[in-house]
Amino acid sequence: MSTSIAELLPSISALSHADKFRLVQLVLAQLAQENDVEVEEIQQSAAPFNPQLFFGVTH
């Protein structure tokens, strides 16, 4: 049974931003594995990114 992208889009749209990024990471890792591409693990930073810390920095 094959699922089309059109069928998946409503479920993907319902995901949080963090879950969407994780989904992209999983899909890219699967594609790399299928094509025998070596992938480096990305280390997560100690603290999560907070964009409010950078608001107005360019002004």
Image: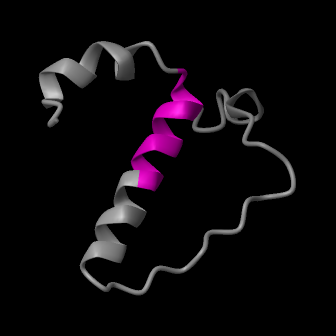
Colour approach in the figure: one colour
Instruction: Give left or right: position of 13 versus 3.
Output: right
7 vs 34, left or right, is left
Q: Position of residue 42 (x, y in %)?
A: 62, 69
Quadrant in the picture for the C terminus: top right
Residue at image location 33% in from the left, 84% down from the top: 37
The spot of residue 29 in percent (x, y) is: 41, 65
Quadrant including the N terminus: top left
Residue under the point 36% across and 75% down: 33
Q: Is residue 19 magenta?
A: yes
Q: Does 42 sit left or right of 23 as displayed?
A: right
Farthest residue in the front direction? 1
The residue drawn where x is 36% and y is 60% is: 28
Please say if 30 is above or below 26: below
Q: Is residue 23 above or below residue 34?
A: above
Q: Position of residue 39 (x, y in %)?
A: 46, 80
Above or below residue 7? Residue 29 is below
Q: Main secondary structure of the magenta part?
A: helix
Task: Residue at 74% x, 34% y: name it.
Answer: 50
Q: Is residue 39 left or right of residue 1?
A: right
Residue 56, picture quadrant: top right
Quarter location, residue 32: bottom left
The segment highlighted magenta reads: 16-26
Specify whether residue 18 is painted magenta: yes
Query: Could you tell me how many numbered marks the image carries?
Result: 0
Closer to the camera in the image, 43 or 22: 22
**x then y, percent, for residue 34:** 28, 74
Q: Residue furthest toward the right?
A: 46
